């Protein structure tokens, strides 16, 4: 089961890296899917790219961990990374954003990450 957990972790890391690149190159299109009700003004698009940098680097860090760290360390780091989608969901919900995005995108990401942690830790 540990291997399945690591595969899920790798897929999640690759996915957030791609999301980050999309926020860097097509930030307004990506922001529309995040779940918040209003996009920042066009002049504030650079702020969306900040999210892109955060997400792309998170994916790179996940790759480094998967290559260089023991599975238990990977699991603990994924557990810490889970705070990102949980925080995103809370922000969407607390701002009156789309519940479908909060739960369907951010909530399901957090659950998938927790599943990965459980599978990795269960196999260690």
Image (cartoon, helix red, strand yellow):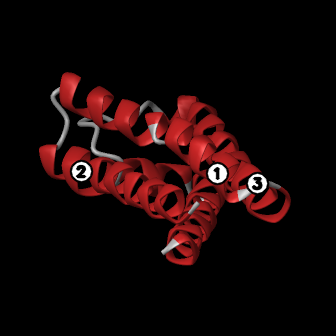
Q: Residues within 10 Å of mark 1 (few under 14, many from 20)?
A: some
Q: Position of residue 63 (x, y in %)?
A: 75, 61
Using the image, determine if residue 25 lies above or below residue 52.
below
Q: Residue at x 53, y 61 (%)?
A: 120
Question: Would you name the residue on which mark 2 appears?
Answer: 101
Question: Would you name the residue on which mark 3 appears?
Answer: 65
Answer with left or right where residue 80 lies relative to residue 119: right
- How far separated are the C-alphas under marks 1 and 3? 10 Å
Q: Earlier in the sequence, mark 2 or mark 3?
A: 3
Q: Nearer the viewer, residue 46 or 15?
A: 15
Q: Secondary structure at mark 3?
A: helix
- How far separated are the C-alphas under marks 2 and 3? 28 Å
Question: Would you name the residue on which mark 1 appears?
Answer: 72
Answer with left or right where residue 48 lies relative to residue 88: right
The quarter of the picture where residue 37 lies is: top left
Tag 1 near tag 3, CB within 8 Å: no
Q: Position of residue 3 (x, y in %)?
A: 58, 76
Residue lying furthest right: 68
Q: Residue at x 75, y 56 (%)?
A: 70
Using the image, determine if residue 64 lies above or below residue 82.
below
Q: Secondary structure at mark 2?
A: helix
Using the image, determine if residue 106 lies above or below residue 25.
above
Q: Position of residue 118 (x, y in %)?
A: 42, 56
Q: Earlier in the sequence, mark 2 or mark 1?
A: 1
Q: Earlier in the sequence, mark 1 or mark 3?
A: 3
Residue 112: image tag? none
Q: Nearer the viewer, residue 95 or 63?
A: 63
């Amino acid at each position: 089961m540990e291997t399945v957990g690591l595969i899920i972790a790798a897929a999640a890391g690759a996915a957030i890296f791609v999301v980050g690149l999309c926020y860097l190159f097509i930030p307004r299109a990506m922001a529309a899917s995040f779940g918040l009700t209003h996009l920042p003004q066009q002049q504030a698009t650079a702020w969306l790219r900040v999210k892109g940098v955060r997400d792309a680097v998170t994916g790179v860090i996940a790759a480094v961990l998967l290559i260089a760290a023991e599975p238990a360390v990977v699991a603990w780091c994924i557990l810490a990374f889970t705070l990102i989608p949980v925080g995103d969901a809370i922000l969407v919900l607390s701002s009156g954003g789309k519940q479908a995005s909060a739960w369907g995108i951010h909530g399901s990401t957090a659950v998938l990450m927790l599943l990965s942690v459980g599978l990795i830790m269960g196999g260690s």
